[in-house]
Amino acid sequence: MHDPTLHLESRCIHGGQQVDPTTGAVMPPIYTSSTFVQESPGVHKGFEYSRSHNVTRFAFERCIANLESSGLSESDDRTCGGFAFASGLAAISTALELFDSGATILCMDDVYGGTNRLLQRVRRRSQGLKVVFADLSDAKSVAHAAAQHRPALIWAETPSNPTLKIVDIAAIAAAGQSVGAITAVDNTFASPILQRPIELGIDLVMHSVTKYIGGHSDVVGGCLVTGRKDLAEKLRFMQNAIGSVMGPFDGYLTLRGAKTLGLRMARHCESAMVIAKWLEQHPAVERVVYPGLASHPHHALAAKQMRLNGSPAFGGMITIFLKGGLAESRAFLEKVHLFALAESLGGVESLIEHPAIMTHASVPPAERATLGISDSLVRLSVGIERVDDLIADLEGALPKG
């Protein structure tokens, strides 16, 4: 179903979906068959082999394409420009195969540690990529770096991981167009509920659907969405040729998670704002980084760019700098109990982690220091528990002053 008049919360449930034509099932069955019978060689019902075609995966791919406003129809691309993979890194890896050996990649300096590792420690060697890192949260830096390096790809995260920088998405799109680069945004932290980069001119959107879209910490996956028919055609080939596709069970779980994404994101945003304001007043906290706070250097841009039902909404991720260093951070993280000390984010349960030791340990120490990923930095993923309980958990674990 594609009805542009539907609100996002309704599109989470109905976008790109149709009842099962055989049984009328409202949820697509989990098609585990690896292969499909052909009436005659090359004559089939649109399905040959499950790496190439899977009904359950297709259902999720059409859903995420709808939520990200790809604008493509099924006649343009089988799943309207949506592509699902076994992980977020598998999605990024496939996207990088769009580029020839030796291509230049202009990348946000503050990105997920796995993205940094893939670019620097794998694709520099195996693909000869020339990776240039820059602070893309500075619009002037974006234009200058694009003109200087003439990249084939500009890759941004917004909000970034873990320092929560905000990138002007429209400026990224303009910079890419000025030099003929493909532009891509990792939209994991915001989800399509809060921002849809394709609507602002971006060519390619990526999600780790393990996070907010799946939403229940029970599935690993990634996706790409494009509004360009030419890129969809190339990605269709790459997805099948490389083969790191999302399996049918994961496709089912991710689609199920997507149906409540609108409701969950509203709660994540609401609670995170309350907690961020509370943390900002706590004597044990040196600094709070949250796009919804007036103290955030990109607050005005975030308020313009991240929206929920027409009003500013800033996501469920908070970064704090504790007073002290590693010892204080470790003591705090060992005392929380409702916030689970674990990697990942975006689930219904609240998570907390130490990027320098955990998610960004693969980033060289000198780079971490330049980015401000210090031993006092702690990242919170605010879940959908009662906010009073979350604050009580933090209060019990933080030093008293």
Image (cartoon, grey):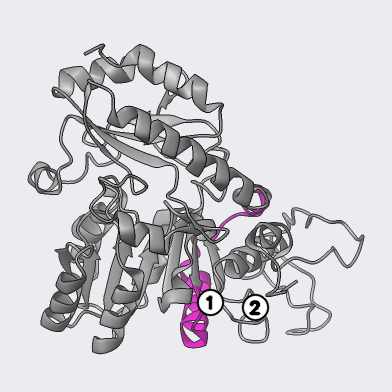
Where does label 1 land, which residue? 236
Q: Is 82 or 161 nearer to us in this picture?
A: 161
Q: In this view, does 303 lie to the left or right of 162?
A: right
User: Amino acid type of disc 1?
Assistant: Arg
Q: Residue at x 58, y 69 (%)?
A: 65
Q: Is residue 300 above or below residue 197?
A: above
Query: Residues in magenta?
Result: 226-255
Residue 190 visible in this rendered orientation of the protein = yes
Name the quadrant containing residue 345.
top left
Q: Is residue 364 above or below residue 59?
A: above
Q: Is residue 180 above or below residue 214?
A: below
User: Judging from the image, what secondary structure is the residue with disc 2 in?
Assistant: loop
Where does label 2 land, which residue? 78
Q: Is residue 172 above or below residue 294?
A: below
- State if disc 1 and disc 2 touch (CB < 8 Å): yes
Question: Quarter holding the C terminus?
Answer: top left
Crowd tier of the residue under label 1, counting other residues whose Cα lies within 10 Å: few below 14, some 14–19, many 20 or above: some
